[in-house]
Image (cartoon, rainbow, N blue to C red):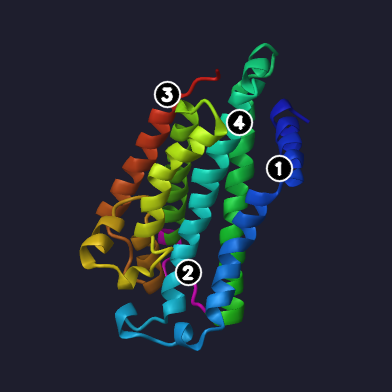
Amino acid sequence: MNTLAKITLTETKIALRTPGFVIGGLVLPTAITAVLGVIPGIRAESGTTSGLRFLDAWVPSMIVLTMAMMGLQAIPGIIASYREQGILRRFATTPVHPAQLLVAQLIINVTVTIGGVGLLLVTAGAVFDVPSPRHPAGFLLTFVLGTTAIFGLGLIAAAVAKTSRAAGGIAMIAYVPIMFLGGVWLPRPLLPEAIRDIGAYVPPGVKAMEDAWTGTGAQPLQLAVLAAFAVASCVVAAKLFRWE
């Protein structure tokens, strides 16, 4: 077993001892969808959702919730706490590069994100007959770009924060608007048109996900802007990141 695999296994064991974010990322979006799904009005078609049920329109927003929880709450807090506790500094004195610890954390949290989204899609489809994306390739591309952008923003917060509390506060600057524009707190069809338009061009690309569901297909400009966010956030995080 190579060094990265060993570190990833160790970090996974640590995460499972304090599984708050792991359980939240895996279960919370599905649980919220299940609670909403038992409400008859949520399962009814509505003119404000272009013939879709409110429940169908809310599933992409629950994907946003999964991404935001893991990318903007879990990863910044964990990395900043390691800096705060001197763990990264101690790694720097060993043959193991601290970057391997960072990669291990990214592997764990991205895996939880994928697992949470997968559980959500399977449960929503099997229990509530929520249709799958009509453009799977477009959905997958948007998911990859959106996840990269969100985790890049989270790493920026981790890069400049000296404590886990500070990292959480900095990440909230992105977390709050992303949750609002992504329709987590209020369904996007009920948001003002101007707000929906802004949300179409910011991470994690909820409008492109919606378009993948309906079959209209994401607009190239939306994907290009999302890709620019993904690249820019990762580059900025790499430039700002310090192990101590």
Relative to 143, is 60 above or below? below
Span of residues in magenta: 130-138
- In the rendering, which numbered label is found on residue 240? 3
- The tag on residue 81 is 4
* Mark 3 neighbour class, 10 Å CA radius: few under 14, some 14 to 19, many 20 or more: some
Task: Give the mark nearer the N terminus: 3 vs 4.
Answer: 4
- Residue where numbered disc 1 is placed: 15
Residue at (49% x, 44% y) in the render:
72
Mark with earlier residue (1, 3): 1
Marks 3 & 2, CB-CB < 8 Å contact: no
Q: Is residue 76 magenta?
A: no
Q: Where is the C terminus found, in terms of image quarters?
A: top right
Q: Secondary structure at mark 3?
A: helix
Q: Which residue is mark 2?
A: 59
Q: Is residue 111 above or below residue 184?
A: above
* Amino acid residing under circle 1: Ala
As helix, strand or loop, the secondary structure at mark 1 comes to helix
- Which quadrant holds residue 122? bottom right
Mark 4 nearby-residue class (10 Å; few <14, some 14–19, many ≥20): many
